[in-house]
Amino acid sequence: MILSENHGLSKDELVPAFAFYLISNEGEPSMRLVDVPDIDAGKTWAMDAIRSASLHTIRFWDGVRVIEVQRPAMRQPRQKPSDAEERGKRMIAMKAKGMKQREIAAAFGISIGRVRDVMSREELRAREEAIQTNRAALSGRANNVLRHLVIEPEADPAERDRLLPERVATLTRGIILNVGNSGKVTLAEIEAWLWERGLCLSADI
């Protein structure tokens, strides 16, 4: 971190500034000194600069470490619903058309009890997805990785979901990659998901 020279201010009132190293998609990198109050504000400035210009990466120094903010790769669309999920949706649609459970069971060649189970699971999944929109935007694997890393003490699922992006933003790439069943694809998905919410991962120390 560098203290900018502001005339008329005492030493204690100097505004913190960070040296930003801008790496563009085309052309030569450049250096810029920007007055920002803290690291979080520096990350926000970097993300805004990347969005508004043809930039790929911005690195800045906080006096101890180099913090990198990088434009993530475009997120892949969510995978198609699983066979079980698709079947549950079809059953619910058939029920909405007035079909009885025994008729639905006959159409799928399963028992009425099995129909109830499949429909109940799909209805529960749909309710959770409607309440937890942030989690719903992640794949099952990414969600499982984050469940190992993020502590969510709130009883209200909607509040947990609201706080999830901010909590994930405190993680680093190294922490995420150290979780079993994680990898570069999952990391890229989480970074792109955060980027869509105006956030990015913290820097590895």
Image: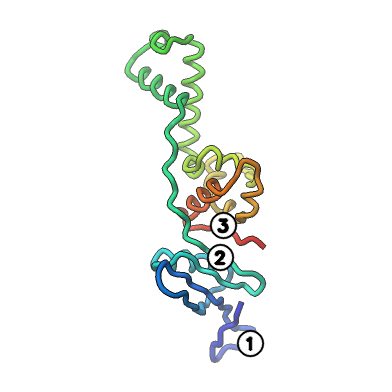
Determine whether label 2 and label 3 are within 8 Å by CB: no
Residue drawn at (51%, 79%), measured in percent from left and top? Answer: 33
Amino acid tagged 3: Leu
Left or right: 146 as drawn, with respect to 107: right
Mark 2 vs mark 3: in front: 2
Q: Quadrant of residue 2?
A: bottom right
* Comes first in the chain, label 1 or label 3: 1
User: Residue 128: horizontal and vertical position, in percent?
Assistant: 50, 34
Left or right: 26 as drawn, with respect to 45: left
Q: Which residue is mark 2?
A: 68
Real-space CA distance between mark 2 and mark 3, rounded to the nearest whole angstrom? 9 Å
The foreground one among 99 and 156 is 99
Where is the C terminus found, in terms of image quarters? bottom right
User: Residue 22: horizontal and vertical position, in percent?
Assistant: 48, 72
SS assignment at label 3: loop
Q: Is residue 82 above or below residue 160?
A: above
Q: Residues within 10 Å of mark 1 (few under 14, many from 20)?
A: few
User: Residue 198: horizontal and vertical position, in percent?
Assistant: 47, 58
Left or right: 39 as drawn, with respect to 102: right
SS assignment at label 2: strand
Residue projecting furthest to the left: 97
Real-space CA distance between mark 2 and mark 1, rounded to the nearest whole angstrom? 29 Å
Q: Which residue is mark 1?
A: 11
Q: Which residue is mark 3?
A: 201
Real-space CA distance between mark 1 and mark 3, rounded to the nearest whole angstrom? 33 Å
Residue drawn at (47%, 32%), measured in percent from left and top? Answer: 127
Where is the N terminus found, in terms of image quarters? bottom right
Residue drawn at (53%, 49%), measured in percent from left and top? Answer: 190
Left or right: 146 as drawn, with respect to 127: right
SS assignment at label 1: helix
